[in-house]
Image (spheres, helix red, strand yellow):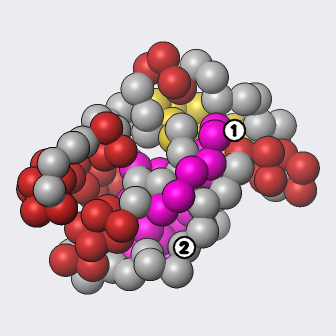
Amino acid sequence: MIRVLFVCIHNSARSQMAEAYLNALGGGRFEAKSAGIEPGKLNPVVVEAMRLDGIDISHNRVKAVEEFIERGERFDYLITVCDETAAERCPFVPGTGQRLHFGFPDPSAITGTVEERLATILPIRDAIKQKIIEFIGGHP
């Protein structure tokens, strides 16, 4: 089992989507979790975007990276999914194998109506899904 921790700023969108896709598409070979540097609230528009792709994350909770550090959890990969500057703020997680960075735009920065935000989030969701499919493909 390959263990992966996805990290972004608030654990409200990008890392939640990456976690859900890896767990859903990884064929049972991966165990994905997610956390935030400064945990916020789960983005309801992201919840809807994932629902439209058949994945329910509505019951997920946001988590802090520190929770995993305090429990001494070990991961084969720590993957940051925020921008480069924010990724540099990610704390060192002991017991982590490889650290990777997959940068995606921040859904929490998107403004407008729910419909406008959803229309902007769907391509981000799809880009995250594609990157996860590529990651899975690199681990036969």
Looking at the rendered structure, the kind of residue marked 2 is Asn
- In the picture, the quarter occupied by the C terminus is bottom left
Q: Position of residue 80 (x, y in %)?
A: 51, 36
Judge from the rendering whether residue 63 lies leftward or rightward of residue 74; answer left or right: left
Mark 2: secondary structure: loop
Marks 1,2: beta carbons within 8 A: no
Mark 1: secondary structure: strand
Residue at 24% over, 67% down: 49
Nearer to us of marks 1 and 2 is 2
Q: Which residue matches tag 2?
A: 60
Q: Which mark is residue 122?
A: none
Q: Position of residue 51 (x, y in %)?
A: 27, 78
Looking at the rendered structure, the kind of residue marked 1 is Gly
Residue at 44% over, 39% down: 81
Q: Residue 52, located in which quarter of the rendered image?
A: bottom left
Residue at 27% over, 73% down: 48
* Range shown magenta: 14-42
Residue at 41% over, 54% down: 13
Q: Which mark is residue 97?
A: 1
Residue 77 makes an appearance in the image: no
- State the separation of the CA atoms marked 1 and 2: 25 Å
Judge from the rendering whether residue 14 lies leftward or rightward of residue 92; answer left or right: left
Badge 1: residue crowd in 10 Å (few <14, some 14–19, many ≥20): some
Judge from the rendering whether residue 2 lies leftward or rightward of residue 129; answer left or right: right
Q: Position of residue 35 (x, y in %)?
A: 62, 51
- In the picture, the quarter occupied by the N terminus is bottom right
Badge 2: residue crowd in 10 Å (few <14, some 14–19, many ≥20): few
The answer to if 41 sits in the magenta stretch is yes
Q: Position of residue 127 (x, y in %)?
A: 21, 48
